[in-house]
Image (cartoon, rainbow, N blue to C red):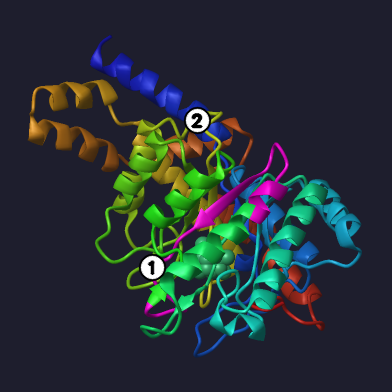
Amino acid sequence: MTGSTAHEARTAAAKAVLKRQSIETPSWAYGNSGTRFKVFAQAGVPRTPREKLDDAAQVHAFTGAAPTVALHIPWDRVEGGPEGYAELAAYAEERGVRLGAINSNVFQDDDYKLGSVTNPDPAVRRKAVGHLLECVDIMDATGSRDLKLWFSDGTNYPGQDDLRDRQDRLAEALRTVYDRLGDDQRMVLEYKLFEPAFYATDVPDWGTSYAHCLKLGEKAQVCVDTGHHAPGTNIEFIVAFLLREGRLGAFDFNSRFYADDDLMVGAADPFQLFRILYEVRRGGGLDTDSGIAFMLDQCHNIEAKIPAIIRSVMNVQEATAKVLLVDVDALAEAQREGDVLAANGVLMDAYNTDVRPLLEDVREELGLDPDPMGAYKRSGWQERIVKERVGGEQAGWGA
Ligand code: RM4
Ligand code: MN
Protein backbone atom coordinates (compact mmCIF):
# COMPACT_ATOMS: atom_id res chain seq x y z
CA MET A 1 0.00 0.00 0.00
CA THR A 2 1.31 3.44 -0.84
CA GLY A 3 1.52 6.02 1.90
CA SER A 4 -1.55 7.87 0.75
CA THR A 5 -3.69 4.76 0.24
CA ALA A 6 -2.74 3.64 3.73
CA HIS A 7 -3.80 7.03 5.04
CA GLU A 8 -7.11 6.78 3.21
CA ALA A 9 -7.70 3.33 4.66
CA ARG A 10 -6.99 4.63 8.15
CA THR A 11 -9.37 7.53 7.62
CA ALA A 12 -12.14 5.23 6.41
CA ALA A 13 -11.65 2.90 9.37
CA ALA A 14 -11.61 5.88 11.74
CA LYS A 15 -14.88 7.15 10.33
CA ALA A 16 -16.57 3.82 10.88
CA VAL A 17 -15.56 3.83 14.56
CA LEU A 18 -16.48 7.48 15.05
CA LYS A 19 -19.91 6.93 13.56
CA ARG A 20 -20.80 4.38 16.17
CA GLN A 21 -19.00 5.95 19.10
CA SER A 22 -21.25 6.75 22.03
CA ILE A 23 -20.56 8.85 25.06
CA GLU A 24 -22.97 8.78 27.98
CA THR A 25 -23.88 12.10 29.52
CA PRO A 26 -24.65 12.51 33.22
CA SER A 27 -28.06 13.81 34.29
CA TRP A 28 -26.44 15.89 37.03
CA ALA A 29 -24.34 17.88 34.58
CA TYR A 30 -27.57 19.48 33.30
CA GLY A 31 -28.47 20.75 36.77
CA ASN A 32 -26.95 23.45 38.90
CA SER A 33 -23.67 22.70 40.61
CA GLY A 34 -20.88 24.60 42.25
CA THR A 35 -18.18 24.42 44.85
CA ARG A 36 -18.56 24.35 48.59
CA PHE A 37 -18.38 28.13 48.39
CA LYS A 38 -21.26 28.86 46.06
CA VAL A 39 -23.67 27.41 43.54
CA PHE A 40 -24.49 29.94 40.82
CA ALA A 41 -27.95 29.15 39.50
CA GLN A 42 -28.47 29.39 35.74
CA ALA A 43 -31.69 30.30 33.97
CA GLY A 44 -33.45 27.46 32.15
CA VAL A 45 -31.90 24.66 34.20
CA PRO A 46 -34.07 21.51 34.42
CA ARG A 47 -36.36 21.03 37.37
CA THR A 48 -37.18 17.38 36.90
CA PRO A 49 -35.51 14.23 35.60
CA ARG A 50 -37.66 14.54 32.48
CA GLU A 51 -36.36 18.02 31.77
CA LYS A 52 -32.82 16.73 32.19
CA LEU A 53 -33.62 14.10 29.57
CA ASP A 54 -35.02 16.81 27.30
CA ASP A 55 -31.65 18.57 27.48
CA ALA A 56 -29.70 15.36 27.03
CA ALA A 57 -31.76 14.70 23.91
CA GLN A 58 -30.50 18.00 22.52
CA VAL A 59 -26.90 16.98 23.07
CA HIS A 60 -27.58 13.74 21.23
CA ALA A 61 -29.52 15.46 18.47
CA PHE A 62 -26.60 17.76 17.67
CA THR A 63 -23.69 15.38 18.21
CA GLY A 64 -25.24 12.05 17.23
CA ALA A 65 -22.90 10.55 19.79
CA ALA A 66 -24.62 10.80 23.16
CA PRO A 67 -27.52 8.33 23.03
CA THR A 68 -27.60 7.43 26.72
CA VAL A 69 -27.99 9.34 29.98
CA ALA A 70 -26.76 8.27 33.40
CA LEU A 71 -29.07 8.75 36.37
CA HIS A 72 -28.06 9.55 39.94
CA ILE A 73 -30.34 8.25 42.66
CA PRO A 74 -31.88 9.97 44.62
CA TRP A 75 -31.17 13.11 42.56
CA ASP A 76 -33.30 11.60 39.80
CA ARG A 77 -35.85 9.95 42.02
CA VAL A 78 -39.31 9.60 40.47
CA GLU A 79 -42.60 8.64 42.08
CA GLY A 80 -44.22 5.27 41.58
CA GLY A 81 -41.39 2.85 42.33
CA PRO A 82 -40.11 0.62 39.50
CA GLU A 83 -43.05 1.57 37.33
CA GLY A 84 -42.12 5.22 37.62
CA TYR A 85 -38.62 4.42 36.37
CA ALA A 86 -39.97 2.30 33.54
CA GLU A 87 -42.06 5.32 32.54
CA LEU A 88 -39.00 7.52 32.72
CA ALA A 89 -37.16 5.08 30.46
CA ALA A 90 -40.07 5.20 28.01
CA TYR A 91 -40.01 8.99 28.13
CA ALA A 92 -36.28 8.97 27.34
CA GLU A 93 -36.92 6.82 24.29
CA GLU A 94 -39.65 9.16 23.11
CA ARG A 95 -37.04 11.90 23.25
CA GLY A 96 -34.55 9.82 21.28
CA VAL A 97 -32.23 8.78 24.11
CA ARG A 98 -32.00 5.86 26.54
CA LEU A 99 -31.23 5.58 30.23
CA GLY A 100 -27.72 4.42 31.02
CA ALA A 101 -25.82 3.70 34.21
CA ILE A 102 -27.51 4.06 37.56
CA ASN A 103 -25.26 5.98 39.94
CA SER A 104 -25.81 5.24 43.58
CA ASN A 105 -25.57 7.93 46.19
CA VAL A 106 -24.62 6.98 49.73
CA PHE A 107 -22.86 10.20 50.58
CA GLN A 108 -25.47 12.80 51.34
CA ASP A 109 -27.40 11.56 54.37
CA ASP A 110 -26.50 12.59 57.90
CA ASP A 111 -26.21 8.90 58.73
CA TYR A 112 -23.18 8.66 56.47
CA LYS A 113 -20.97 11.04 58.43
CA LEU A 114 -18.62 8.20 59.37
CA GLY A 115 -19.14 6.22 56.20
CA SER A 116 -21.83 4.25 54.39
CA VAL A 117 -20.99 0.65 53.57
CA THR A 118 -17.88 0.82 55.77
CA ASN A 119 -19.55 2.63 58.68
CA PRO A 120 -18.78 1.05 62.07
CA ASP A 121 -22.54 1.00 62.81
CA PRO A 122 -24.19 -2.05 61.23
CA ALA A 123 -27.54 -0.25 60.98
CA VAL A 124 -26.00 2.43 58.77
CA ARG A 125 -24.33 -0.23 56.66
CA ARG A 126 -27.68 -1.96 56.22
CA LYS A 127 -29.26 1.29 55.14
CA ALA A 128 -26.50 1.92 52.58
CA VAL A 129 -26.70 -1.59 51.17
CA GLY A 130 -30.48 -1.19 51.02
CA HIS A 131 -30.00 1.84 48.79
CA LEU A 132 -27.61 -0.03 46.52
CA LEU A 133 -30.09 -2.88 46.18
CA GLU A 134 -32.81 -0.38 45.38
CA CYS A 135 -30.56 0.92 42.60
CA VAL A 136 -30.47 -2.60 41.14
CA ASP A 137 -34.29 -2.68 41.28
CA ILE A 138 -34.24 0.56 39.32
CA MET A 139 -31.86 -1.00 36.80
CA ASP A 140 -34.33 -3.83 36.33
CA ALA A 141 -37.01 -1.27 35.54
CA THR A 142 -34.91 0.92 33.25
CA GLY A 143 -33.02 -1.87 31.52
CA SER A 144 -29.72 -0.32 32.60
CA ARG A 145 -26.68 -2.52 32.50
CA ASP A 146 -24.37 -0.77 34.96
CA LEU A 147 -24.53 0.12 38.62
CA LYS A 148 -21.91 2.74 39.32
CA LEU A 149 -20.55 2.71 42.82
CA TRP A 150 -18.64 5.55 44.31
CA PHE A 151 -18.16 5.70 48.04
CA SER A 152 -17.21 8.80 49.96
CA ASP A 153 -16.24 6.44 52.78
CA GLY A 154 -12.99 6.98 54.58
CA THR A 155 -11.45 8.56 57.63
CA ASN A 156 -10.03 11.97 58.41
CA TYR A 157 -7.73 11.07 61.27
CA PRO A 158 -5.32 8.25 61.95
CA GLY A 159 -6.89 5.90 64.46
CA GLN A 160 -10.41 7.16 63.74
CA ASP A 161 -11.47 3.68 62.64
CA ASP A 162 -9.83 0.40 61.78
CA LEU A 163 -8.67 0.52 58.16
CA ARG A 164 -8.70 -3.24 57.83
CA ASP A 165 -12.16 -3.75 59.31
CA ARG A 166 -13.44 -1.18 56.88
CA GLN A 167 -12.15 -3.31 53.99
CA ASP A 168 -14.01 -6.30 55.43
CA ARG A 169 -17.22 -4.29 55.63
CA LEU A 170 -16.75 -3.03 52.11
CA ALA A 171 -16.20 -6.54 50.79
CA GLU A 172 -19.32 -7.79 52.53
CA ALA A 173 -21.50 -5.00 51.14
CA LEU A 174 -20.14 -5.44 47.64
CA ARG A 175 -20.78 -9.17 47.80
CA THR A 176 -24.42 -8.65 48.80
CA VAL A 177 -24.98 -6.25 45.93
CA TYR A 178 -23.01 -8.35 43.46
CA ASP A 179 -25.12 -11.41 44.22
CA ARG A 180 -28.26 -9.41 43.47
CA LEU A 181 -27.10 -8.48 39.95
CA GLY A 182 -28.88 -10.06 37.00
CA ASP A 183 -27.03 -11.94 34.27
CA ASP A 184 -26.76 -8.88 32.05
CA GLN A 185 -25.96 -6.42 34.80
CA ARG A 186 -22.59 -5.25 36.11
CA MET A 187 -21.21 -3.14 38.88
CA VAL A 188 -18.49 -0.63 38.12
CA LEU A 189 -16.46 0.39 41.15
CA GLU A 190 -14.90 3.81 41.21
CA TYR A 191 -11.88 4.80 43.24
CA LYS A 192 -10.71 8.16 44.48
CA LEU A 193 -7.59 8.98 46.40
CA PHE A 194 -9.06 11.59 48.71
CA GLU A 195 -12.07 13.78 49.40
CA PRO A 196 -14.32 14.05 51.23
CA ALA A 197 -12.18 11.83 53.46
CA PHE A 198 -8.79 13.43 53.88
CA TYR A 199 -6.70 10.80 55.61
CA ALA A 200 -7.73 7.50 54.03
CA THR A 201 -10.47 6.65 51.59
CA ASP A 202 -11.72 3.08 51.55
CA VAL A 203 -11.35 2.69 47.77
CA PRO A 204 -8.44 5.03 47.13
CA ASP A 205 -6.96 3.58 43.96
CA TRP A 206 -7.41 1.23 41.03
CA GLY A 207 -5.56 -1.55 42.83
CA THR A 208 -8.09 -1.59 45.65
CA SER A 209 -10.99 -1.49 43.24
CA TYR A 210 -9.42 -4.20 41.08
CA ALA A 211 -8.74 -6.49 44.03
CA HIS A 212 -12.36 -6.28 45.18
CA CYS A 213 -13.61 -6.80 41.63
CA LEU A 214 -11.40 -9.85 41.15
CA LYS A 215 -12.82 -11.51 44.26
CA LEU A 216 -16.38 -10.66 43.30
CA GLY A 217 -16.39 -12.02 39.78
CA GLU A 218 -16.59 -10.93 36.17
CA LYS A 219 -19.60 -8.70 36.59
CA ALA A 220 -17.49 -6.41 38.76
CA GLN A 221 -15.36 -3.98 36.80
CA VAL A 222 -13.21 -0.98 37.59
CA CYS A 223 -14.39 2.52 36.73
CA VAL A 224 -11.65 5.03 35.99
CA ASP A 225 -12.72 8.57 36.82
CA THR A 226 -10.00 10.63 35.21
CA GLY A 227 -10.20 13.26 37.95
CA HIS A 228 -9.58 10.87 40.83
CA HIS A 229 -5.82 10.49 40.75
CA ALA A 230 -2.85 12.13 42.37
CA PRO A 231 -1.11 14.74 40.21
CA GLY A 232 1.30 13.12 37.80
CA THR A 233 -0.36 9.70 37.83
CA ASN A 234 0.08 7.86 34.55
CA ILE A 235 -3.59 7.12 33.92
CA GLU A 236 -2.97 5.53 30.54
CA PHE A 237 -0.86 2.87 32.21
CA ILE A 238 -3.76 2.02 34.51
CA VAL A 239 -6.03 1.84 31.48
CA ALA A 240 -3.62 -0.43 29.60
CA PHE A 241 -3.25 -2.71 32.61
CA LEU A 242 -6.96 -3.00 33.37
CA LEU A 243 -7.80 -3.65 29.73
CA ARG A 244 -5.20 -6.38 29.58
CA GLU A 245 -6.84 -7.98 32.60
CA GLY A 246 -10.34 -7.56 31.19
CA ARG A 247 -11.40 -5.39 34.10
CA LEU A 248 -11.87 -1.93 32.66
CA GLY A 249 -15.61 -1.43 32.84
CA ALA A 250 -16.11 2.28 32.54
CA PHE A 251 -14.72 5.76 32.34
CA ASP A 252 -15.95 8.83 34.13
CA PHE A 253 -14.39 11.48 31.93
CA ASN A 254 -13.62 14.97 33.15
CA SER A 255 -10.61 17.25 33.49
CA ARG A 256 -8.67 18.37 36.48
CA PHE A 257 -6.02 20.93 37.11
CA TYR A 258 -5.65 20.38 40.85
CA ALA A 259 -8.03 17.87 42.40
CA ASP A 260 -11.47 16.54 41.49
CA ASP A 261 -12.25 19.65 39.45
CA ASP A 262 -14.88 17.99 37.22
CA LEU A 263 -14.12 20.34 34.33
CA MET A 264 -14.89 19.51 30.71
CA VAL A 265 -12.98 16.46 29.53
CA GLY A 266 -10.09 17.38 27.28
CA ALA A 267 -10.05 20.95 28.56
CA ALA A 268 -7.15 20.74 30.98
CA ASP A 269 -5.00 18.25 29.15
CA PRO A 270 -6.08 17.09 25.69
CA PHE A 271 -2.81 15.24 25.28
CA GLN A 272 -3.54 13.12 28.34
CA LEU A 273 -6.96 12.28 26.93
CA PHE A 274 -5.26 11.24 23.69
CA ARG A 275 -2.79 9.04 25.55
CA ILE A 276 -5.58 7.39 27.52
CA LEU A 277 -7.65 6.76 24.40
CA TYR A 278 -4.64 5.41 22.57
CA GLU A 279 -4.35 2.69 25.23
CA VAL A 280 -8.09 2.12 24.94
CA ARG A 281 -7.65 1.50 21.24
CA ARG A 282 -4.56 -0.63 21.80
CA GLY A 283 -6.47 -2.81 24.26
CA GLY A 284 -9.48 -3.30 21.98
CA GLY A 285 -11.60 -0.85 23.91
CA LEU A 286 -12.92 0.83 20.76
CA ASP A 287 -14.18 -2.46 19.34
CA THR A 288 -17.95 -2.86 19.19
CA ASP A 289 -18.09 -5.55 21.85
CA SER A 290 -15.59 -4.01 24.30
CA GLY A 291 -18.28 -3.38 26.90
CA ILE A 292 -16.59 -0.22 28.15
CA ALA A 293 -18.99 2.51 29.17
CA PHE A 294 -17.60 5.88 28.14
CA MET A 295 -19.30 8.36 30.41
CA LEU A 296 -18.86 11.96 31.35
CA ASP A 297 -18.86 12.89 35.03
CA GLN A 298 -18.68 16.64 35.00
CA CYS A 299 -20.14 19.75 36.57
CA HIS A 300 -20.61 23.03 34.78
CA ASN A 301 -20.47 25.64 37.48
CA ILE A 302 -19.88 28.82 35.49
CA GLU A 303 -20.32 27.82 31.85
CA ALA A 304 -23.60 27.16 30.04
CA LYS A 305 -24.42 23.52 30.61
CA ILE A 306 -25.76 22.08 27.35
CA PRO A 307 -23.06 23.62 25.14
CA ALA A 308 -20.43 22.54 27.68
CA ILE A 309 -21.64 18.98 27.38
CA ILE A 310 -21.70 19.21 23.59
CA ARG A 311 -18.14 20.51 23.70
CA SER A 312 -17.12 17.66 25.98
CA VAL A 313 -18.56 15.06 23.62
CA MET A 314 -16.68 16.74 20.78
CA ASN A 315 -13.46 16.70 22.78
CA VAL A 316 -13.75 12.95 23.25
CA GLN A 317 -14.54 12.53 19.56
CA GLU A 318 -11.51 14.59 18.55
CA ALA A 319 -9.15 12.65 20.80
CA THR A 320 -10.61 9.39 19.52
CA ALA A 321 -10.20 10.47 15.91
CA LYS A 322 -6.53 11.28 16.50
CA VAL A 323 -5.96 7.95 18.17
CA LEU A 324 -7.56 6.17 15.22
CA LEU A 325 -5.18 7.94 12.85
CA VAL A 326 -2.10 6.55 14.58
CA ASP A 327 -0.15 4.54 12.03
CA VAL A 328 0.07 1.43 14.16
CA ASP A 329 2.25 -0.47 11.67
CA ALA A 330 4.82 2.32 11.58
CA LEU A 331 4.67 2.53 15.35
CA ALA A 332 5.21 -1.19 15.80
CA GLU A 333 8.14 -1.11 13.39
CA ALA A 334 9.80 1.80 15.15
CA GLN A 335 9.27 0.06 18.49
CA ARG A 336 10.77 -3.18 17.16
CA GLU A 337 13.78 -1.31 15.89
CA GLY A 338 14.17 0.52 19.16
CA ASP A 339 13.86 3.81 17.32
CA VAL A 340 12.72 5.97 20.18
CA LEU A 341 12.30 9.18 18.25
CA ALA A 342 10.53 7.60 15.30
CA ALA A 343 8.07 5.82 17.61
CA ASN A 344 7.34 8.98 19.52
CA GLY A 345 7.05 10.83 16.22
CA VAL A 346 4.35 8.46 14.94
CA LEU A 347 2.20 9.16 17.99
CA MET A 348 2.82 12.90 17.84
CA ASP A 349 1.97 13.05 14.12
CA ALA A 350 -1.44 11.64 14.90
CA TYR A 351 -1.90 13.88 17.92
CA ASN A 352 -0.99 16.97 15.93
CA THR A 353 -3.41 16.22 13.09
CA ASP A 354 -6.32 18.61 12.81
CA VAL A 355 -9.18 16.12 12.87
CA ARG A 356 -11.96 18.67 12.87
CA PRO A 357 -12.56 18.40 9.10
CA LEU A 358 -12.73 14.62 9.43
CA LEU A 359 -15.36 14.92 12.15
CA GLU A 360 -17.28 17.42 10.07
CA ASP A 361 -17.42 14.82 7.30
CA VAL A 362 -18.52 12.16 9.75
CA ARG A 363 -21.37 14.37 10.95
CA GLU A 364 -22.44 15.28 7.46
CA GLU A 365 -22.46 11.64 6.47
CA LEU A 366 -24.70 11.00 9.47
CA GLY A 367 -27.04 13.75 8.35
CA LEU A 368 -25.99 16.10 11.16
CA ASP A 369 -24.88 19.70 11.13
CA PRO A 370 -21.07 19.66 10.92
CA ASP A 371 -20.93 22.30 13.66
CA PRO A 372 -22.82 21.02 16.74
CA MET A 373 -22.01 24.08 18.89
CA GLY A 374 -23.28 26.51 16.28
CA ALA A 375 -26.29 24.36 15.44
CA TYR A 376 -27.33 24.23 19.10
CA LYS A 377 -26.96 27.97 19.40
CA ARG A 378 -29.08 28.54 16.31
CA SER A 379 -31.72 26.03 17.40
CA GLY A 380 -33.36 28.39 19.88
CA TRP A 381 -33.51 25.64 22.55
CA GLN A 382 -31.64 27.73 25.10
CA GLU A 383 -34.03 30.69 24.74
CA ARG A 384 -36.97 28.32 24.93
CA ILE A 385 -35.94 26.67 28.21
CA VAL A 386 -35.09 30.02 29.77
CA LYS A 387 -38.59 31.21 28.91
CA GLU A 388 -40.48 28.06 29.78
CA ARG A 389 -38.72 26.80 32.86
CA VAL A 390 -39.85 29.34 35.36
CA GLY A 391 -41.07 28.48 38.83
CA GLY A 392 -40.46 25.17 40.50
CA GLU A 393 -37.16 24.14 41.92
CA GLN A 394 -34.11 23.81 39.75
CA ALA A 395 -32.24 20.54 39.84
CA GLY A 396 -28.90 20.54 41.53
CA TRP A 397 -26.91 18.66 44.10
CA GLY A 398 -29.37 17.08 46.44
CA ALA A 399 -32.30 17.50 44.05
C1 RM4 B 1 -17.97 11.66 42.87
C2 RM4 B 1 -17.80 10.55 41.87
C3 RM4 B 1 -19.08 10.02 41.33
C4 RM4 B 1 -20.11 11.06 41.10
C5 RM4 B 1 -20.19 12.07 42.22
C6 RM4 B 1 -21.15 13.21 41.87
O1 RM4 B 1 -16.77 12.33 43.08
O2 RM4 B 1 -16.98 11.00 40.83
O3 RM4 B 1 -18.87 9.33 40.13
O4 RM4 B 1 -21.32 10.39 41.04
O5 RM4 B 1 -18.93 12.61 42.48
MN1 MN C 1 -17.07 9.88 38.94
Residue 57 image label: none
Q: At 66% across and 45% down in the image, what residue appears?
A: 67
Q: Which residue is mark 2?
A: 17
In the image, the segment drawn in magenta is 176-199
Ligand 1, by image quadrant, is bottom right
Is residue 180 magenta-colored? Answer: yes
Q: Is residue 120 left or right of residue 270?
A: right
Few, some or many C-alpha atoms within 10 Å of disc 2 (few <14, some 14-19, many ≥20)? Answer: some
Is residue 333 visible in the rendered image? The answer is yes
Q: At 55% across and 41% down in the image, what residue appears?
A: 217
Few, some or many C-alpha atoms within 10 Å of disc 1 (few <14, some 14-19, many ≥20)? Answer: many
Task: Give residue 124's position: percent from left, percent from top.
Answer: 67, 77
Sequence order check: which comes first, mark 1 or mark 2?
2
Task: Give residue 227's position: percent from left, percent from top.
Answer: 41, 63
Q: Which residue is mark 1?
A: 193
Disc 2 is placed on an element classified as: helix
Inspect the image, locate mark 1, and give the three-letter code of the amino acid beneath it.
Leu
Q: Nearer the viewer, residue 359 or 325?
A: 325
Q: Quadrant of the C terminus?
A: bottom right
Q: At 63% across and 83% down in the image, what residue appears?
A: 41
* Vertical relation: 85 (above or below) 1: below
Task: Give residue 16's position: percent from left, percent from top.
Answer: 51, 26
Q: Are marks 1 and 2 in contact (CB under 8 Å)?
A: no
Task: Give residue 371's position: percent from left, percent from top.
Answer: 53, 48
Which residue is most to the top? Answer: 1
